[in-house]
Amino acid sequence: MILACQNVTKSFGTNEIIRNASFHIEEREKAALIGINGAGKSTLLKIIIGEMSSDQGEVILAKGKTIGYLAQHQELSGHLTIYEEVLTSKQELIEMERKIRELEKSMKSCPKEELEQLLSSYNRLQHTFELMNGYAYRSEVTGVLKGLGFGESEFDKQISSLSGGQKTRVALGKLLLTKPDIILLDEPTNHLDMDSIAWLETYLMNYNGAVLIVSHDRYFLDRVVTKVVEIDNGKVTSFDGNYSSYSQKKAMIREAAYHAWFNQQQEIRHQEEVITKLRSFNREKSIRRAQSREKMLDKMEVLEKPTSVRSDMRISLEPRITSGNDVLTVEHLSKSFPGQMLFNDLNFEIKRQEKVALIGSNGTGKTTILKILNEVVKPDAGTFSLGSRVQIGYYDQEHQVLHMDKTIFQEISDEYPYLTNTEIRNVLAAFLFTNDDVFQPIHTLSGGERGRVSLAKLMLSNANFLILDEPTNHLDIVSKEILEAALRDYTGTVLYVSHDRYFINQTATRILELTNQNLVNYIGNYDYYLEKKEELTKIYAPEESPNASANTETELSSSKLDWKAQKEEQARQRKRENELKKTEKRIEELENRDSQIDEEMSRPEIATSAAECVKRSKEKAAIASELEILYEKWETLAE
């Protein structure tokens, strides 16, 4: 065991956030700390790290072990560059390297009688330096920075010029490189693109220490953690397994707890009715029996009602007007900013009822495409057109049209006066606004809270083409699941940018990846994208090489296939794969039947019957004829 919390309790005023929390983390264990927004996850991390005191209980860190912590927001400052700031995590090695160089200089000019002592110190220091991987620390720093999405051209940027998200990535890099025995991470994937998240997953899975992670990224948790610590209504419970395993166990436990509570409530009501009836007889015996039952009720340990599951909630999205089949057509779209080409000659279409995820690394231009489609930004070249009866609903965290003087409730009720109070409250609850939260004025909300109000408004609109920029940011897991269900059932069309791979897997019918200034189309969800990524990127968006040989001519010409050709080619490919499977299955069936006929004809009752022999001989001939055709077809498909 490396870390243990024992009976930790924390309240703010009369609000008890954490109650008697007890759990432990083993050495090298990777664990998740989960719960709805406001459950107390960040509070518990701060108590563990010592930034906040608990009301009671204690946190125990194993003797001699080190702990590191990454908060959601970082206040890095100063005039160091990104590379210099992260390099400070290797200060011990830098100092050791400096001493080694000093000893080398001293040994060149020192008297003979001192040389042996200096040489001994030098060898000892160099051995320690080597054991600590000192000769590779600079390349290690470079590797971590690149893994977290920083290009070498950004290494010289000053910390003071960075955004909040970039500062968090720098702080994460420093923390990983210090290699504490246990790392506490609060939403580490919030400012990472997909490639960086995949890199972090691999890094943490192979990390030699323990990790405790707060995250709403279910795909990430499924890949990394082997234990889930849940905070639910102040109570802390541990579950073995990843997030999916936890989710299944939690559903079973919640159902069992609800049935136990419900059955007990029925029993209490029954006993109360019997007591009332016995007292109504007004006889000494019946009154004594009523009193006996009352004592039994008083001694009963009444179960708490399990907390309601917001995942039972549903948001119903239904466009008022059905659009034409052709929703969006984009032709020859290009956009660049000074010194940076984002994309060039993009062509694609979106049809009615498609749910299309637009993905790619940070800075490739995904959000810019959405802004062009909403006429917030003008393209350098190219056009786009909307189909008949298409009405856009746009969610952009930077451009939220909200009335600052209204409350959250008024913002929704004034926009949709036909909704009942209950309907409005249900929708707002799905986006984390409950009880008196709905009466907060808009101007008092944080950026993330305003984003959730905007998203709630959009989900209620009559738009039939939703364009969403990072819709799951600032949502907890349950709210994401509500939104996923709503989008899956939505009969309109959706185009969205997201880094949430689990969300994409649940909602996307097609993926467009913006890479190497081109779009690559994947007719499937995120799992299909992972399967085909390497193959299709080489064909449709190869990296430019100044020394490309003549042998790449075919690939280069393929990369210039227009959108329709690319889509048709992939559809043909999937059709071919399905046809190949069907052919193989039919061949196997016929070959099995052919063998079966041979066995049947060797039986005496069949061999001595001319009619049965003729019947099976004809069937064998038909099988041979069909197999000949199928073998030829299989060869064609396989090629």
Image (tube, rainbow, N blue to C red):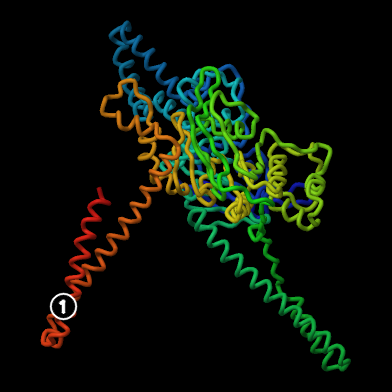
Q: Residue at x 70, y 66 (%)?
A: 305
**Residue holding disc 1:** 599
- Is residue 153 visible in the rendered image? The answer is yes
Q: Amino acid at mark 1?
A: Glu
- Asked whether, in this view, residue 580 is left or right of residue 84, the answer is left
Mark 1, secondary structure of its residue: helix
Q: Residue at x 22, y 65 (%)?
A: 626
- Position in image of residue 417 (x %, y %): 81, 51
- Position in image of residue 254 (x %, y %): 61, 65
- Position in image of residue 97 (x %, y %): 40, 19
378 vs 288, nearest the viewer:
378
Indicate whether 98 appears above or below 504: above
Q: Residue at x 42, y 29 (%)?
A: 143
- Position in image of residue 138 (x %, y %): 41, 23
88 vs 273, nearest the viewer:
273
Indicate whether 11 appears above or below 120: below
- Badge 1, how many Cα within 10 Å: few under 14, some, many 20+? few
- Is residue 2 visible in the rendered image? The answer is no
Which of the 4 image quadrants contains residue 280? Answer: bottom right
Q: How many numbered discs?
A: 1
- Asked whether, in this view, residue 524 is left or right of residue 279, the answer is left
